[in-house]
């Protein structure tokens, strides 16, 4: 048991370290200026500065007047903490506003179409001989004792009781420390995106989990059964879903092609570990990874694209409110 705990702790530290100092360029991409720039401004000053108008504009880079030299990877930012301790409600308010936009995109026509394509692909794999054929080929050509050990390590990234606290803790990093360090900002942004991906994609995973059930490879039955909870496993792998989230979001946060390829490759390994352990069929692992990718892409689009309507939390003199802006 001690060795298992040590292994999990080492994996956690590796996951966090992988995102932080990976590349200073990651601190330069897709940061909405509103998350770091509206403190210490009155509502009138916010309107004058046009900060809310540009809140979701990726082309509006931070200026020296807000938190230090633009894209200041090598320059120290201002000394005032960007998220002051005690403003947890402000962070949660922004998270809820962003998550609402994520859900709108995920359950849009585009999002539901892509989800339907993934669901249809998984259904074909599960309800034909393809799942069984692939499992047999994998067992004969890939499965081994050394592969099992590697799969044990990768499975830890799909453990919700381990990774969810990492996501949430990273997202709340700004409430307890100064985010002027670019690596701290990257970890905070990564945690925010991972948490939002978990929320928006988790609803789809839970819906499929309780709608379609199936057997495990040891049961020799990959077919889906509607509203049957006694089959032993759902049609989607939760480990594949959770395990893909940290790597996919890290890949979307960097423009470095080598890192992007490495992160996307790593995102598949927790799903593969379930196939290696004969706990899930290919269709179940594929569906879990696919929902994670779709949810992360929705979060990425929220950060990247300009929106005609924006509703954001806004600190006021006598409390906390909400402001809506329109772009035309």
Image (cartoon, helix red, strand yellow):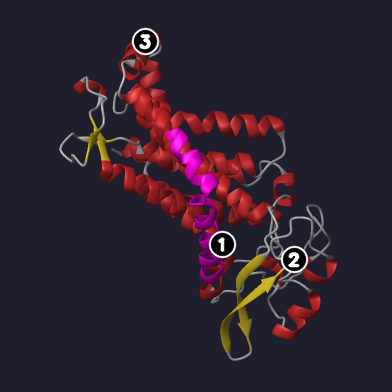
Mark with earlier residue (3, 1): 1
Which one is in front, 90 or 328?
328
**Quarter of the picture holding the N terminus:** top left
Q: Are marks 2 and 3 in contact (CB under 8 Å)?
A: no
Residue 214, given in percent of the width and then of the height, sits at 24, 31
Q: Are marks 1 and 2 in contact (CB under 8 Å)?
A: no
Mark with earlier residue (1, 2): 2
Magenta span has 96?
A: yes
Residue located beneath label 1 in the image: 98
User: Can see residue 258?
Assistant: yes
Residue located beneath label 3 in the image: 137
Q: In this picture, is 220 found above or below 280?
A: above
Q: In this picture, is 280 found above or below 228?
A: above
Q: Is residue 6 left or right of residue 172?
A: left
What residue appears at the point 62 percent right and 50 percent down from the top-left corner?
Answer: 301
What residue appears at the point 49 percent right and 41 percent down from the top-left corner?
Answer: 113
Magenta span has 177?
A: no
Circle 2 packing at 10 Å, graded few (<14), some (14-19), many (20+), is many
Q: Quadrant of residue 241?
A: top left
Residue located beneath label 2 in the image: 54
Residue 127, given in percent of the width and then of the height, sits at 30, 24
Q: Which residues are magenta?
A: 92-118
């Amino acid at each position: 048991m001690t060795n298992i705990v040590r292994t999990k702790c080492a994996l956690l530290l590796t996951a966090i370290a992988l995102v932080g100092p990976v590349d200073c360029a990651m601190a330069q991409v897709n940061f909405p200026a509103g998350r770091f720039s509206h403190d210490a401004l009155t509502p009138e000053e916010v309107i004058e500065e046009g900060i809310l108008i540009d809140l979701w504009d990726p082309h509006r880079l931070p200026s020296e007047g807000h938190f230090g030299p633009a894209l200041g990877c090598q320059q120290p930012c201002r000394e005032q903490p960007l998220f002051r301790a005690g403003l947890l409600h402000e962070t949660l308010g922004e998270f809820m506003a962003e998550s609402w936009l994520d859900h709108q995109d995920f359950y849009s026509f585009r999002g539901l179409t892509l989800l339907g394509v993934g669901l249809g692909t998984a259904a074909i794999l599960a309800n034909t001989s393809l799942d069984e054929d692939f499992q047999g080929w994998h067992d004969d050509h890939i499965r081994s004792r050394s592969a099992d050990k590697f799969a044990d390590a990768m499975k830890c990234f799909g453990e919700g009781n381990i990774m969810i606290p990492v996501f949430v803790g990273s997202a709340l990093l700004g409430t307890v420390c100064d985010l002027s360090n670019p690596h701290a900002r990257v970890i905070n942004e990564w945690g925010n995106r991972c948490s939002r991906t978990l929320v928006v994609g988790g609803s789809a995973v839970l819906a499929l989990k309780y709608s379609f059930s199936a057997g495990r490879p040891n049961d020799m039955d990959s077919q889906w059964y509607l509203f049957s909870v006694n089959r032993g496993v759902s049609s989607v792998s939760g480990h594949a879903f959770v395990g893909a989230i940290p790597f996919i979001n890290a890949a979307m946060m960097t423009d470095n092609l080598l890192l992007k390829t490495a992160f996307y490759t790593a995102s598949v390994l927790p799903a593969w570990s379930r196939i290696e352990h004969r706990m899930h069929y290919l269709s179940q692992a594929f569906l879990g990874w696919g929902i994670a990718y779709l949810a992360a892409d929705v979060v990425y689009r929220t950060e990247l694209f300009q929106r005609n309507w924006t509703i954001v939390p806004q600190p006021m003199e006598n409390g906390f409110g909400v402001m809506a802006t329109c772009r035309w």
